[in-house]
Image: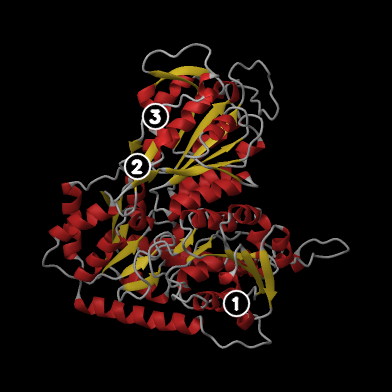
Amino acid sequence: MNQRILHHDTSPAFSASASAAPAAGTVRLTMAQAMIRYLAAQRVRTEDGAGIEPLFGGVFAIFGHGNVAGIGEALYQHRKELPTLRAHNEQAMAHSAIAYAKAHFRRRMMAVTTSIGPGATNLLTAAALAHVNRLPVLLLPGDVFITRAPDPVLQQVEDFNDGGISANDAFKPVSRYFDRIVHPAQLLTALPRAIRVLTDAALCGPVTLALPQDIQATAWDFPAEFFEPRVINFHAPAPVVEEISAAVERLRQARRPMIVAGGGVLYGHATHALQAFASAYGIPVAETQAGKGSLAWNDPLNTGALGVTGSPAANALAHDADCVLAIGTRLQDFTTGSNTLFTQADVIGINANAFDGLKHRGQVVEADARLALGALTTELSGWRADPGWTARAQKLAADWRDTVGMLTHAPQHESVLPYDADVIGAVQRSSATSATDDIVVCAAGTLPAELHKLWRAGRPGAYHVEYGYSCMGYEIAGGLGAKLARPERDVIVMVGDGSYLMLNSEIATSVMLGAKLIIVVLDNRGYGCINRLQQACGGAPFNNMFDDCEQGPLGAPPVDFAAHARALGAQSEHVANVAELEAALQRARAADRTYLISIDTDAARTTDDGGWWWEVAVPEVSPREGVRAARAQYETHLAERARAAGDAKHD
């Protein structure tokens, strides 16, 4: 442990800022100095439990007026024990910080600081992403002067009806905890509250502390004990006896149960408990996007992805299940097929957050996933799922694994563009360890659907796809955060051309930090995913693909992604086919820095196997025949859902 943080700092930097000698048992610091010193003192046990390490892996910072003089000076003083990392885009660096926490299963995290104006509001998308995905990140945007002496200050957003509002108030709906620090003493309550939210399984999400720039620079006599290093105990609720008893009673009545494994299984370190529970009781398991990797891809009871992007095995079983045990998932519409996939089943929601556990009319067990599975195991002795149901699940799962093998090893024809499954297969074949050590990172478009079905996750954390918010632009920044968290593993960022063009600046950051990424850009010349959805809803191809957009006399630009990546400091190449991709991936793995490979892919083709209905409202009135036909089909699905819900209610 760094001994510098075990004693109160008496360096000239601290003493010079004091206007008076501190009282006994106190240390005089500016608000910013105190905040950074407190964050640097927080500790967490290592994954093996044998040691301790900092809770915060560092602070991403883009300085501007409002944070350079206050927080910037404090970060400089503590740069050894709390590293400061420079990024190129505020949203991107927050994505990196969020991905860092996700890759650590929420046991370590990062902070992010910005200036007061566009730097702060650039964080809002990332804050919403962290909120939706229940991931911890500490956001530290600068704020306007509390004194309001320079009013309006540069970049200040003024409210005509409320003088106390600044741009940072926009963070309130996308933060799990928000505070504006208007006096240094406020840190004594605000910082412990912030840490509790960041490390509490039920509360976890983004915390925003808005920091007025004059208060950042204001000194106060802080209790010295406030800065003593402290090992954090992560809080997760234990199950309530009555809720476990009710769940056991329902499960004992079930013959065709199914488990839906969500992100809470991974964050609760419950993967071993899940495997043991499913095996002991013969229950098939399907995985959400956040929960993929909860079971090894070749576990006999792993039926694969569930829902709109699901496997035929998982969806068939989910449709026929009489009881669904939803563990650590909020059951969003892609998982439930817009509430049509298992309307006939009773749902038991095991979740640290009761709000999430109650989704889909679930019978809730408000508890940590691992603790709840342990309690259920104790109470379910003598019960198993129907043997025929278990055997059917194992057969469907095995058949789907064979299908995945065929889809990702299909023969290639030079005259036909590859599609996502071909590229996924090439990436997985490129690993000497069958990709068990790779981390694949993705976020939006068609790729998450294909990866959810086809990526073979051999261990927890091998699959890192942000799909709670489905945020274009997360991919490269998220890959950087994952690599910072897991530097010993190859991080493969798979990204479409649309997301790449939206946010790619952290390629330069990855080179600067020596955090090597392997980036595979699938170029289909536009927003292929939404273009297909547009046409499925009866619309004409419009404003999605380059060829269907308004253009000037020069037409759409021929984007050279390899050349662009080289301009940002990476190595790169463009390949013409899957065989060339496989060879390029070997060069990328051997490279000493971030390496980008681009390949042209088919914008229309997707994997036909699996999938489920997803509700997208189609216009009720349109002059286009295609839209009217799509509306009629949409109304048929609505009627089927209503009928199924009515049948379930009467049952």
* Residue that badge 3 annotates: 7
Q: Position of residue 380 (x, y in %)?
A: 14, 62
- Badge 1: how crowded within 10 Å, few (<14), some, or many (20+)? many
Badge 2 amino acid: Asp
- Badge 3: how crowded within 10 Å, few (<14), some, or many (20+)? few
Comparing marks 1 and 3, which lies closer to the viewer? 3
Determine contact: label 2, label 1, CB under 8 Å: no
- Badge 2: how crowded within 10 Å, few (<14), some, or many (20+)? some
Residue at image coords 65%, 54%: 508
Give the position of the N terminus as an image quadrant: top left
Q: Position of residue 410 (x, y in %)?
A: 54, 86
Comparing marks 3 and 2, which lies closer to the viewer? 3
Give the structural element (helix, strand or loop) at label 1: loop
Give the structural element (helix, strand or loop) at label 2: loop
541 or 593: nearer the viewer? 593
* Residue that badge 2 annotates: 200
Seen in the image, is 457 located left or right of residue 555? left
Residue at image coords 50%, 79%: 429
Q: Position of residue 98 (x, y in %)?
A: 49, 49
Whether residue 146 appears in this view of the structure is yes
Residue at image coords 46%, 24%: 10
* Residue that badge 1 annotates: 419
